[in-house]
Amino acid sequence: MAGEHLSREIAEQPEVLARLLNAGEPRIREIAAGLAKRWGDVAFMVIAARGTSDNAARYAQYLFGASNRLSVALATPSLFTLYESPPDLSRSFTVGISQSGASPDIVAPVKEARRQGAPTLAITNEPDSPLALAADFVLPLNAGSERSVAATKTYTAQLLAMAMLSASLARPEEADRRWRELSMVPRWVAETVGLAGQIGQQAERFRYLDRLVTSGRGYCYGTAFEAALKLKETCYLLAEPHASADFLHGPVAIIESGFPALLVAPTGAAFPDMVAFARPLGERGAELLVVSDSDEALGLARTPLRLPAGVPEWLAPIPAIVPCQLLALSLARVKGLDPDRPRGLSKVTLTY
């Protein structure tokens, strides 16, 4: 059946996340202890990533910013490779995120930061990869082989790995609460995986869909990008991601009756803004697909995609991407495509 690998790997995510929590916690705490010895010299964080991993990095910008009060920048790999003009990273904590750990332009910033004396971390599913060998610390995802080109379980494992690291670097009075919340992640993801049948039926409505916008804000800003990427990769849609605030600065002009918009709107600090954004889109006739745990937000949708109740906002991006993965899988099948083998793509992409 088309998408067999993608379907199986989406379903494996609760198990992968539970394994990472159980086996990865000692390693995370060891890394946090090693970083603590050098933390006084760290002024900011830099993350090198591409593709799906870049969307995990967008989550990290909000996670480490809000929870650890650390300014987080996305690396500019071309400065290290094409222009050979690396910035000063000596006071950074530089992290490379990559499923394969093989791309030279992700390895380069990590290698340069380490050369400058900054602490470095590799988050990868391949602990013997060039990226892992370049870093001071390595956090293996242990997600198992991912055969579908579209990343799913490695993406949610990357999100969880960073959430675990953030919790380990938190103040002691916060850390215990955050680890208790982390322990619930596999259960919340299992609940969203259970939406597969419902979303399979809903996908038929979008058989002829060829364009849409996706939107999220705050912690789920990266989720909007990852949802768009999955739909591009598997269904060949023109899918454009935006923060809700950015969308109002011009792109909103494209909205007309029937224009599809996928909104990621879990409850939390960004929720009122997302609801205020959704209402005028609906009034202009947009076809709203809404991922949320709120009846208020779901009530605005033509296609509601319900998240589990009780998920704190800082962890919402982990279960929130699952309905989007399932939508991409189901829509590709409805369109007669094989999402395991998207045209022109391979599992490992080497860029310089």
Image: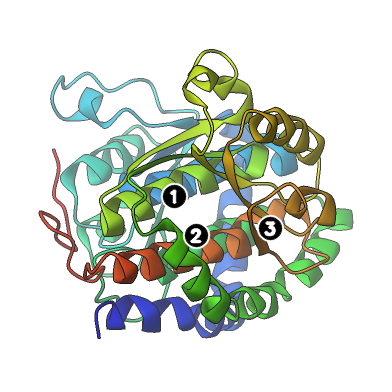
Residue corresponding to mark 1: 226
Kindly report the distance in space between the C-alpha atoms of the residues bearing marks 1 and 2: 9 Å
**For this rendering, which residue is in front, 225 or 282?**
282
> Residue visible at 69% across and 74% down?
188
Image x and y of residue 59, in percent: 56, 45
Please, what is the three-letter code of the amino acid marked with disc 1?
Glu
> Residue visible at 81% across and 46% down?
268
Please, what is the three-letter code of the amino acid marked with disc 3?
Leu
Answer with mark 1 or mark 2, whichever residue precedes in sequence. 1
Relative height, residue 275 to residue 133 (above, below): above
Relative height, residue 343 to residue 190 (above, below): above
Residue 178 seen in the current view: yes
- Residue contact between numbered discs 3 and 1, judged by CB atoms under 8 Å: no
Image x and y of residue 294, in percent: 81, 55
- Residue contact between numbered discs 1 and 2, judged by CB atoms under 8 Å: yes
Q: Callout 1: helix, strand or loop?
A: helix
- Locate residue 200 relative to residue 52 in the image: left or right: right
Residue corresponding to mark 3: 315
Image x and y of residue 155, in percent: 44, 61
Find residue 324 and name its label.
2
**Label 2 Cα crowd, 10 Å radius (few <14 / some 14-19 / many 20+):** many
Kindly report the distance in space between the C-alpha atoms of the residues bearing marks 3 and 2: 16 Å
Res. 183 image quadrant: bottom right
Please, what is the three-letter code of the amino acid marked with disc 2?
Cys
The quarter of the image holding the C terminus is: top left
- Locate residue 13 relative to residue 349 in the image: left or right: right
